Amino acid sequence: MLKGYEFGADLRGYFNIRQKAGAFVNGVLYELDQHCIDILDEAEGFPQVFSRAEIMVEDLKGQLIKAWVYLQPPEKFGGNYIKENFLKIVISGAQGNRLPEAWIKFLQTFSPTESNNGKFELNA
């Protein structure tokens, strides 16, 4: 779990995270070698589109682990839709990785067609 960050739509129709006190993001941790990080950097548009930051995340055992995250500038956060195919991939990945049911239901509140004015809240 990534504490102190919120999860939401960016202006391009993809998900992004940004710092927000009291918020949290569920996700999956992967162990990658430098070659894989280099490939991921290129795919994510680092450093032109995203910056990369090392942060502390909490694993299922409650232990803190260093992890990399990709971050867009704050002004790119707050979109009002998610691309339909991308939304399906993210929900499928959350289900396949057995993320909490409340998180999956939260992901399902995002719409590829309806405007939510960038406001999505997880009621945990």
Image (tube, rainbow, N blue to C red):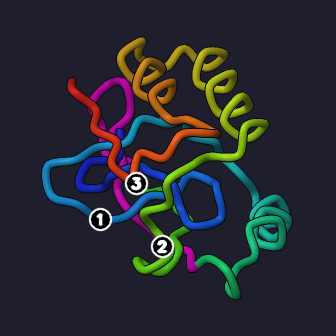
Give the image location of residue 35, x and y in percent: 85, 65
Magenta part mainly helix, strand or loop? Answer: strand
Please say whether residue 31 is one of the residues in the magenta stretch.
Answer: no
Considering only vertical position in the picture, is 58 above or below 34?
Answer: above
Q: Nearer the viewer, mark 3 or mark 2?
A: 3
* Residue to which mark 3 is pinned: 118
Give the image location of residue 120, x and y in percent: 34, 42
Mark 1 vs mark 2: which is more N-terminal? 1
* Residue to which mark 2 is pinned: 53
Please say whether residue 52 is one of the residues in the magenta stretch.
Answer: yes
Give the image location of residue 72, x and y in percent: 53, 74
How many numbered tags mark residues here? 3
* Residue to which mark 1 is pinned: 19
Residue 68 in view here: no
Q: Secondary structure at mark 3?
A: loop
How far separated are the C-alphas under marks 3 and 1?
15 Å
